[in-house]
Image (spheres, helix red, strand yellow):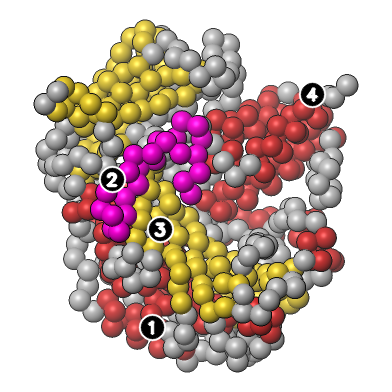
Amino acid sequence: MISRIQKEYEAFKSIITNPHYRNDTSKLNIIYTMVCNAKKDAKYKAELESFIVPDGTGMNFLEAIDTFFREFNNSHGVDIRLSLSPFENPDFPRGLYFIVKTYKEGKNGIAECSPIEYKIGEKAIFRATVYDQVTDEEVVVPLVKYYIYSEDGTEERGEKENSSFIEFSATCHRPGAVRAEVTACDKNGMPISGSEKAVPGAVFDFTEMKTSLPTPDDLGAFWQSEVERMKKVNPTDTSVTPYNGRVAHAFNVTETNYYHIKKADRDYMAILRSKKLTNVPDEVLDNYDLWEFSLKCPGPCPATGYVSVPKDKEPHSLPIKFIYAGYSAHSPQPFFLKNSIAVYSTHHGYPCALSDEECYNELNGKGILGSYGKGNGKPNSDFDDIHDGYTLYLNLRNLQVLRFFANADLSSDIPEVFKVWNGDVNFDGGSLGGYQVIAMSALVNFLDEEINVTQGKAEVPGFCNYAGVNDKRLPNTFDLHHSKNAEYFDAAHLATLVTAPMLIPRNAFGDELCVCSGICMAFNNFKGKKEINFLQNSSHGYRPKPETQLWYKYSNTDNVFQNKLLTNLE
C-alpha cells in the first residue's frame, strides 16, 4: 500500500514538474500546507525528513520542498510563501478562489469587456465570484470585502454579506490604472484560511501612459560613455584592481574580481547538490558542457554565473539565451536548454557554488544587498553618484558577459560556444530579471560586437517609473522610492533605447511590487515590434488556476485588443 508521504511526494513532483502548476498558486498551496503541517506536527515532520526523494540528490522530502521554494523565490524575486494559504479551515477544507470579470455600460446595457480597453472617464465594473477549489462551484461565504484604488487618487471600500460574489466599479480620469483587493471573510470579518485573495485591475488608455518625469535628454550619451568605460576593462584580465568607490561589498569580493573559469565535472555537480543548489543528476553532463565563469568588470565585483552548451549540435545552429534572476541575492543555478546555449548571470557578482548559509543570508534582508536600487537611502539603494553605484555596475556586469560570449577572441577558452552559436541572442527574466532584460535590450546597441537580438522577454519587469510613487500611481509594497538621478536607471526610460522585438509575457493587474502602470509605460516606450499580455487577478507572485486564467493581449502589429482564456499564452 502506498503511504501518505509517498502520495504527497507524487503530488509534489507533479506540481513542480508541470510548467503551469509551478506558477499556479492553488497548486502551490498544497505544498505550503505540507510545510505548515510539519511546523505543527512533529510526527509528520519526522516522516517527511525520513523519506529520501528518489531523484538522486539524496535530499529528504522536507529538504526538497525547501529547495523548491528557494529556487522559485530566487527566480521570481519574491517569497511566494507570503501569497500562499494552508488548507486548514474546517468550513472550507479544500480552499477557495475567485474569478473576476470586467464589464462596461453600453447602449444595450452592461456587457463583458476586456480590462485593457477602457477609455479615461469610463466606468470599469468588476464582478468577483467565489469558487470551491475542488468542485469549481460557486460558494456562499459570510462576507466578501473589497478595496480599490485609482491612479486619479481616489479609493473606495465595500462589503457584501452572505454571498458568492461582489460587484463594484471604478474609473480613472487620466491614462492610468486601477487595482483592487477582494477577500472572502468569516462572520467576524477575518480572511478565511485557505481562500485566495483576488487582486484584479484595469487600465484606461494604457497606450497613452507616460512616465511621471521626462526621459533625460542625455540618457543615450550617458550610457554610451559608461559602456566605453566598461570596454576598457578586459574581461579576461587575471589581475586584481583595487576598488575605492562607494558601493558597499562584503567577503573580500574585490579580490575575486579577475578572470577565471572552471569546467564542471561530476564532482562539481555533487558539491552543488550537497549544498542544495541544484537537483540536476550527473547524467546531464553526458549531454552538455558546463562552465562556471568569473569575468573582470568595472566596480567592486566580477560578473559571475554559468554557461551550458548542448553537445553534438551542428555548427552555428543555436542562439544564446541570457537568463537573469529576480531580486535578492542567491547562488546562481546552472540551466540546461536543449535548443540554446544557456548563460545564467548573477546580478550581484558574488561567487557561485556558495550556499545561502555560507554567503547570501548575510547579504540579503538587512544586508548590503537587501535594498539595492530602491532609492530609499539604505546601502546601495540610491543613485547620488551616477558613475559609481550598484545598479550601474549591475548593468555593466551583464554587458561584460554579453560582450565576452559574443567575441570569439575573448571567449577562446570556451570554443564550444562559438562553434555552435548562430549569432542570435535572446534575453529572458522576470521581476528584477525583467529589468535586466530591458536594460540589456537597450544597451546592447552600444557594444561593438555584431549581435542580433531576436527577442527580449521581460516578465513583470521591475524598476519602471520610479517617480510614480510621487505621482499618485499605484502604490508598491517594495519600499521603492524616487531619488536623484533615478531616471538614468529606470527601465521605462531605458525602454526608449530599445529597438529589438520585445515581449512582456505577463503584466499582472494586481502586482504590488512591479506595478502595472509602470510596466505599461516601459512598453509604450519600446521602439520596435512589441507585445504585452495582461493577466487578470494576478499579483507579483500569485496566479489563478490555469484553466481559469484570463489573459488580455495587445501588440503594435495589429493594434487590436485580444481577450483570451488560455493556459499556455506564455
Of the two numbered discs 4 and 2 on the same chain, state the one appearing first in sequence. Answer: 4
| Foreground tag (2 vs 1) | 2
Which label sits in the foreground, 3 or 4? 3
**Secondary element at image label 1:** helix
Contact between marks 2 and 1 (CB within 8 A): the answer is no
Magenta-tinted stretch = 546-570
| Callout 4 amino acid | Arg
Please tell me which residue lies in front, 15 or 398: 15
Q: Mark 3 or mark 2: name the one nearer the start of the chain.
A: 3
Residue at numbered disc 1: 446
Distance between the alpha carbons at the discs numbered 4 and 2: 47 Å
Label 3: element kind: strand
Asked which secondary structure carries label 4, the reply is: helix
- The residues bearing labels 3 and 4 have C-alpha atoms spaced at a distance of 43 Å
Circle 4 sits on which residue?
4
- CA–CA distance in space, label 2 to label 1: 34 Å
Task: For marks 3 and 2, give the CA distance.
Answer: 15 Å
Q: Residue at x 11, y 38 (%)?
A: 121
Residue 384 visible in the shown view: no
Secondary element under disc 2, as helix, strand or loop, is loop
Q: Nearer the viewer, residue 456 or 316?
A: 316
Q: Mark 3: few, some, or many residues within 10 Å (few <14, many ≥20)? A: many
Q: Taking 102 as reference, is 232 left or right?
A: right
Task: Determine which residue is flagged by label 3.
Answer: 503
Mark toward the start of the polypeptide (3 vs 4): 4
Mark 1 and mark 3 lie on one chain; the one further toward the N terminus is 1
- The residue identified by callout 2 is 561
Q: In the image, is 378 to the left or to the right of 23?
A: left
Whichever of callouts 4 and 1 sits on the residue coming sooner in the sequence is 4
**Of the two numbered discs 3 and 2 in the rendering, the one whose residue sits closer to the viewer:** 2
